[in-house]
Every structure is written in C-alpha cells, then in structure tokens.
C-alpha cells in the first residue's frame, strides 16, 4: 500500500501514482468519513485525469455524508445498468442500423441514409417507436414542409414508417399507436421527348465514350425498366431463347417478368460481357449504385430539358410511346411497367385517349366521305359487309 499524504482538509488525503498516459506521477485523492455508524474510505479522483483537488474532494466528502451524492462504485453500477438497459432498447437509431445492414448498398439506400441522418435521427434517433406521439411526427412534418418539397417530406415520413414497421415485423419493438399522416403529393409528372429530341439523344449516345451510360439509357428506353432494376440486372435474368427479362424485387414488390423485345434483345446481345454477373457492373464487378454524372453529361450534350431525368425520364418516354400508339390498353401497360396498381398507370391515359380521339375523328371523316359523294346521299345500310 502506497503512502498516504494528509491535506489541509479534514478527511481528505492522497496517494501518489503513475500518471495515466504520460510520464511522471499524479495525486489520487481519497475521502474518509463515518456515516450511520459505518466507516467509509473512497477514492474520489485523480489530480490530472479527473481534475481533482483537495477542495473539490472535500465538497464530495460533504455531499457523501449528507447523502446527496452516490459513491464512485454506485456511479459505475448505475452506468453499467444504464448501458445494459440501453442495449435492450430498440431505439429508432438502432433499428435504422439493423434495417440498413440487411439492404444492398444501392443509390436508393444512400439517399435514404442522407434523409435519415439529416431529418429523422436528430428528432427521433434516441427514442423507441412506442415513445412517439402524434405531436412528435406532426412537428417533424410541419418543420420539413417549411423548407422541403411535399415529395421530400413524404419520402422522409415513409422512411420513418419503414424503419418502425421493420422493427415490428422482426419482433424487435412495439409499434406506434397511430397512423403517420402523409402530405398530399401530385405524382402525375410525365416526362416525354418529341421525335427530334429522341433522335438527337440517340445520336449523342452513339458518340459518347462512356462504356455503360449510353447502353443503360437505351435499356431504359427499350424496356421501360427502372434505374434500380437496371443496376440489379444480371445476365441470368435475361432469357434470350424465351424472350423475357426477369425483374428482381421491382420497387419492393414480387418478382416480375417482362417481354424482351427486338430492340432490347439486340442491345443486350451486342453488349460485351465481363466476368461480373451484372449486366452493368460497378466497381470491382459489384452491383452499380450510381451513374448520374455520365448520363447527365449525355442529357446536357443532347440539349434535353433541364428537369428531364435521364433514366426515369426515358422510362416515361417508353410508356408514353406505347400509350399514344392507341394499340396498348392500360392493363397491358401496367404489366409492362410493373406498376402495383392501375392508378399509377393512369397518368398515361390521356395519351391513349388522344390517340383514340384521333382515330374517332378519322372514322368521322371516312364516314362523311361515304355519306356524301358529289352531293348524292348513299345509304350505308345498302353497303355489303
């Protein structure tokens, strides 16, 4: 046992010990006192590590005698219990990290992580879902609405909902006792290109040096596939003999199959394969997560509108061409786009209606020509079928 050194404060002494992390020594202060007939000797802190002094040690001694301060041992036990309780709590932050760990590192997950870190974690990260009340979520929604677009607010709230539902589904936590109110969003934006714009785009793609950007844009145009579906597409998903593409997990729904048309078949057959299982692989042959810079360069070179989204916009072009042809009904278009509900496909209905109107006008012109020929009325019911 090292030597005890007295101080000018009653019941306070120190021992010398090696300084932590540095050369030399420092004082380690102790207090002694009697309480409820029992004698106590307790360490209260180190000179440098804990910034302890004889005066401070004396104040701690007085607080211990009066029962206003727990001992260091009790503090350590309280901290141990707190950590144990924390480890058993499935907070929003802990649920998010568990949710994220089970997801592929896609661009969508990257965007979700940005939304979580910026909007959800500061508000709810240390809370359990059962602790949330309607007012908490209302405050988040109202606060976001002041600076963000309704679609962004909806994405943030939808992510919060997914995290909570994940925890409930995995039996990790209790859910919330209310429904999260989503902002109303007009999701009827339909991007389209006219024939000249489309022709210019295809010419620019042919000249662009990037090995994947152009083919990915063509694939979006020829198949109507989503960006995430193209990034996940593997060679094993393309059946060249039976002429279909197997789409894995389309926007969180069940797997789907869409026809492999001639244009897409020709594109994939002429596209060089690598050792990666992915058609459009990313770094080290892994699944691609981003190609924004290259496709935006092509968009700019082709002079397309500023708000045109290079990949999702071409999916719209694919759908618009089919709808305006008048030869594809809405149910078929829904299946080709792998929409979960017909409401999602209705944004293209006006294009088909316009095509049908033109067909009806053509019929009226033809009928009008048959009814009147040089002023002579012809009875249509006399015509043979």
Image (cartoon, helix red, strand yellow):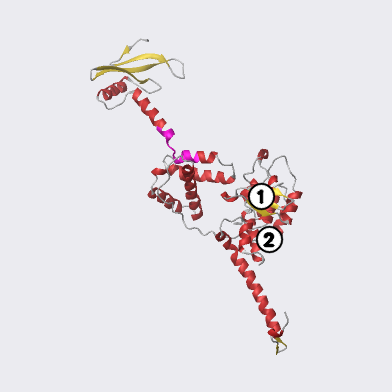
What residue range appears in magenta? Answer: 85-97
Let me know if residue 300 appears in the view: no
Residue 197 image label: 2
Q: Residue at x 59, y 45 (%)?
A: 107
Label disc, if present, on residue 76 of the rendered structure: none
Q: Main secondary structure of the magenta part?
A: helix
Q: In the image, 242: left or right of 329?
A: right
Asked whether, in this view, residue 262 is left or right of residue 13, the answer is right
Badge 1 element: strand
Q: Is residue 91 magenta?
A: yes
Residue where numbered disc 1 is placed: 246
Q: Is residue 137 above or below residue 125?
A: below
Q: Estimate the x, y position of residue 212 in percent, counting from the top left.
A: 70, 47
* Quadrant occupied by the N terminus: top left
Q: Indicate the position of residue 296 as horizontal and vertical percent values.
A: 64, 51
**CA distance for labels 1 and 2:** 30 Å
Give the residue at the far left of this rendering: 37
Q: Nearer the viewer, residue 17 or 370?
A: 370
């Amino acid at each position: 046992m090292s030597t005890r050194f007295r101080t000018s404060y009653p019941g306070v002494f120190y021992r010398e010990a090696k300084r932590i992390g540095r050369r030399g020594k420092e004082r380690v202060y102790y207090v002694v006192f009697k309480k409820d007939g029992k004698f106590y000797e307790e360490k209260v802190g180190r000179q440098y590590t804990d910034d302890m002094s004889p005066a401070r040690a004396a104040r701690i001694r007085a607080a211990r005698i009066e029962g206003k301060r727990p001992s260091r041992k009790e503090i350590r036990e309280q901290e141990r219990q707190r950590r144990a309780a924390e480890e058993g709590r499935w907070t929003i932050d802990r649920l998010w990290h568990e949710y994220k760990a089970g997801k592929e590192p896609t661009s969508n997950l990257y965007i979700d992580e940005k939304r979580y870190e910026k909007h959800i974690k500061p508000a709810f990260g240390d809370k359990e879902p059962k602790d949330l009340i309607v007012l908490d979520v209302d405050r988040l929604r109202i606060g976001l609405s002041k600076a963000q677009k309704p679609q962004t607010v909806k994405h943030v709230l939808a992510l919060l909902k997914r995290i909570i539902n994940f925890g409930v589904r995995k039996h990790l936590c209790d859910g919330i006792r209310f429904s999260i109110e989503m902002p109303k969003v007009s999701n009827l934006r339909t991007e389209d290109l006219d024939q000249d714009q489309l022709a210019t785009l295809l010419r620019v793609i042919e000249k662009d040096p990037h090995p994947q950007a152009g083919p990915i844009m063509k694939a979006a145009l020829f198949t109507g596939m989503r960006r995430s579906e193209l990034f996940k597409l593997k060679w094993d998903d393309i059946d060249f003999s039976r002429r279909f593409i197997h789409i894995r997990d389309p926007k969180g729904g069940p797997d789907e199959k869409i026809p492999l048309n001639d244009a897409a078949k020709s594109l994939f057959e002429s596209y060089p394969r690598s050792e990666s299982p992915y058609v459009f692989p990313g770094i080290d042959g892994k699944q691609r997560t981003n190609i924004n810079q290259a496709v935006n360069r092509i968009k700019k070179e082709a002079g397309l509108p500023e708000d045109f989204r290079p990949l999702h916009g071409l999916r719209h072009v694919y759908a618009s061409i089919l709808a305006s042809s008048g030869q594809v009904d809405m149910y078929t278009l829904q299946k080709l786009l792998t929409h979960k509900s017909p409401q999602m496909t209705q944004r293209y209905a006006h294009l088909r209606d316009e095509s049908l109107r033109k067909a009806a006008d053509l019929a009226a012109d033809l009928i009008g020509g048959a009814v009147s020929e040089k002023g002579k009325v012809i009875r249509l019911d006399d015509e043979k079928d």
